[in-house]
Amino acid sequence: MYKIKTFNQISVKGLERFSREKYEVASDIGHPDAVLLRSHKLHNEVLADSVLAVARAGAGVNNVPVEDYSQKGIVVFNTPGANANAVKELVLAGLLLGSRGIKSGIDHVTTLHDVHDAAELHKTLEAQKKQFAGNELKGKTLGIVGLGAIGSMVADMALALGMNVVGFDPALSIEAAWRLSSDVQKAESMYALLARCDYVSLHVPAIKPTQHMINDDALAQAKPGMLLVNFARESIVDPQAIVKALDSGKLRGYVCDFPEPVFYGRSDVIAMPHIGASTAEAEENCAIMAAEQIMDYLENGNIKNS
Ligand code: MLT
């Protein structure tokens, strides 16, 4: 019998993949053969010697000390692409939220809840709605930093919306390059990309080289009035540099998937609670892929990270 230790937040559809004849799956299991988790941080935990594999039901593995575990011979899996569609769709919401007066308009409507006369409400809104006018995405240039599973889907979506798309990825795999539309223009550096884009969306992992890669120097290159969208990881931007760029008008807005105290109260920042991958479909896809990776490794010794 194989033993699998799970942490909460794993879709039951993934857990159901483990046959009851061969697997015992529980959150409090002793001497597990493998660990299946989503957002739980394993940073300070020493895993039992019995553990052969850790699977993260998600794209990023920054909640797992991959190097330490690899040195102990523990295989670490993630689920690339399994939640890409969910993130892509929220990036679209981010681009629209940053371009149109959606949030301020909705907030404003709630202030009118004491106006009950329809004609008066209509008149008030007609007089006020000019302040919520925005811009269309069509015809604008979107820069995408990181052209993996999510970045390439965002590229296809933006092209379908009639945007020009510029991409940059210093570590573009051959598979990802094949997947990428030929309509995506390639920038020779991130700075060159920042200089020519009205919108920039970040899709890189949280690793040492990407730590604060969006900093004062990078933002100095940005096209004035650019909107920055970050549904990847908060550590890739320097929040103080963002504040300075917003204050100077270099950035017209910042839309992100992580609340940060430094941005509280700013109308030019829209922050969400890390919900890019929070759809029933994505949670199910990730859990199923992670469960299958574990089973294939324990039963057949295969290491398939896709
Ligand atoms: C990811 O890395 O794919 C996301 O963090 C997934 C999640 O929200 O669990």
Image (cartoon, grey):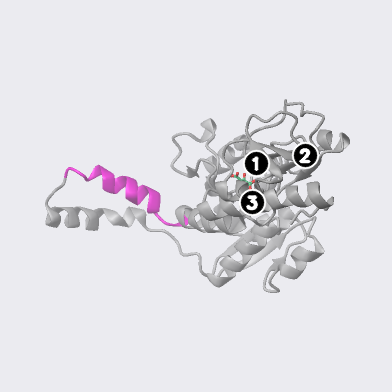
In the rendered structure, which amino acid carries the disc numbered 1? Answer: Val
Frontmost of labels 2 and 3 is 3
> Residue, x 72% and y 57% (percent of image)?
192
Q: Are marks 1 and 3 in contact (CB under 8 Å)?
A: no
Element at badge 1? loop
Q: Position of residue 286 (x, y in %)?
A: 63, 51
Q: Quadrant of the C terminus?
A: bottom right
The alpha-carbon separation of the residues under discs 1 and 3 comes to 38 Å
What amino acid type is highlighted by mark number 2? Lys
Instruction: Report the residue that reaches farthest toward the front.
Output: 21
Label 3, secondary structure: give it: loop
- Give the residue number, with chain letter if any, for mark 1: 237
Q: Main secondary structure of the magenta part?
A: helix
Residues at marks 2 and 1 touching, judged by CB atoms closer than 8 Å? no
- Give the residues drawn in magenta, as a range: 99-114
Residue, disc 3: 17
Residue 75 percent coordinates (x, y): 81, 42
Q: Position of residue 47 (x, y in %)?
A: 76, 29
Mark 2 residue element: helix
Q: How many marks overall?
A: 3
Quote the CA–CA distance across marks 2 and 3: 35 Å
